[in-house]
Amino acid sequence: MQRLIPVLNSDHVPLHLISVINTLLTAAKEISHRLHQGSLAGTLGSTLDANIQGEVQKKLDVVSNQLIKNMLLETQLVHAVASEEEDEVVMGNPDAKYLVAYDPLDGSSNIDINGSVGTIFSILEKPDHPAEGTELFLQTGDEQIAAGYILYGPSTLLVMTTGNGVRVFTLDHTVGEFLLTVDTVTIPQETQEFAINMSNQRHWTTPMQKYIDDLLRGTEGPRAKNFNMRWNAAMVSDVHRVLTRSGIFTYPADLRNPDKPCKLRLMYEANPMSFLMEQAGGRATTGYERIMSIQPEHIHQRVSVIMGSRKEVDTCLTYFKKYP
Ligand code: AHG
Ligand code: MN
Ligand code: MN
Ligand code: MN
């Protein structure tokens, strides 16, 4: 099986970018180890702090964030990082060109129940025009040069793209190498599975309520087939299921909190996952616009997310047209 570096070389990925990705994976191997140690590593449970998102930080949120931030900045190849767990952009080498936005630990509510969690990353380049701090990152998802996630499940997987399709690598723990296990990921168009947190149903806007209602009516409804629901409460593993066996994943806007109608973050959740979805032949939209076309206004901006099989997302979009 091919190791990561020769594969990225064959994809003509620049050496410095390979080094940034490899550094992320070194941090990921340490995170994977601490997760496998569980209680023995003393890093389960919550801290007494909340992050800028208003979430109570898990100990591993903080540890994972520190590991990734410090390792990336030490390479001198990173101009700045933006993290879910950092209020502001953290500046690195002023002469370097890579920008890394990341979610150090996605699905962290699963940590204490031994569920799957992951790390999500999105890599951009310093813009041509002079920019500082947050402004560096205010680029559309189309500007991403690499994106992916590490899924800490029964096996530790790297799923990534540099714009030439989606590849899957599996960590061989014995030698500490990520080996190529899926050369090209393609999302099947037909699906029977949807992923949504049903407990928010009463808060959704009309188009999403009508779309899900029709799914739930199965063979008695207009879809004339039965659907199955899955919800892992970790975007990385719900997205991985869609990339692996099709489906639709959505965390839609809801009416609970008018000034914060969406949950997922654009820069380090929606954009990297949208890049993977489109590269695998899928679609990623807010219901009103393509996610990777959104011009960000700040690094912790939230968006409504509907992504997966192009055919199923297009069906969902007909409800947004029918119930504007
Ligand atoms: P994070 O753990 O990085 O804050 O992200 C959690 C996100 C995402 O991973 C998942 O799809 C969603 O939150 C789950 O939300 P609910 O707990 O509301 O289902
Ligand atoms: Mn969080
Ligand atoms: Mn997350
Ligand atoms: Mn997180």
Image: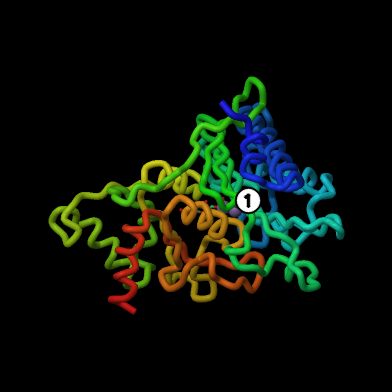
Front-most of residues 219 and 47: 219
Position of the C terminus, as image quadrant, is bottom left
Depicted 179 relative to depicted 242: above or below: above
The residue depicted at 34 percent of the width and 68 percent of the height is: 317
124 or 249: nearer the viewer: 124
Indicate whether 112 appears above or below 256.
above
Point out residue 272 in the picture as x, y percentages from the top left corner. Answer: 57, 55
Residue 188 in view, yes or no: yes
Q: Is residue 39 visible?
A: no
Farthest residue in the top direction? 174
At horizontal 71% and vertical 58% (from top left) the residue drawn is 82
Coloring scheme of the render? rainbow
66 on left or right of 253 = right
The image position of residue 260, as x and y in percent, is 53, 71
Indicate the position of residue 182 as horizontal and vertical percent values.
Answer: 49, 35
Q: Residues within 10 Å of mark 1 (few under 14, many from 20)?
A: many
Question: Secondary structure under badge 1?
Answer: strand
Residue at the far bottom in the pictured view: 324
Residue in the foreground of this view, choosing between 307 and 128: 128
Q: Is residue 92 left or right of residue 62?
A: right
Q: Quadrant of residue 22?
A: top right
Q: Which residue is mark 1?
A: 121
Left/right of residue 86 with respect to residue 241 in the rendered view: right
Q: Please give the name of the residue rendered at 31% of the width and 48% of the height, measured from the top-left corner.
A: 193
The amino acid on which the numbered mark 1 sits, given as a three-letter code, is: Phe
**Taking 133 as reference, is 84 left or right?**
left
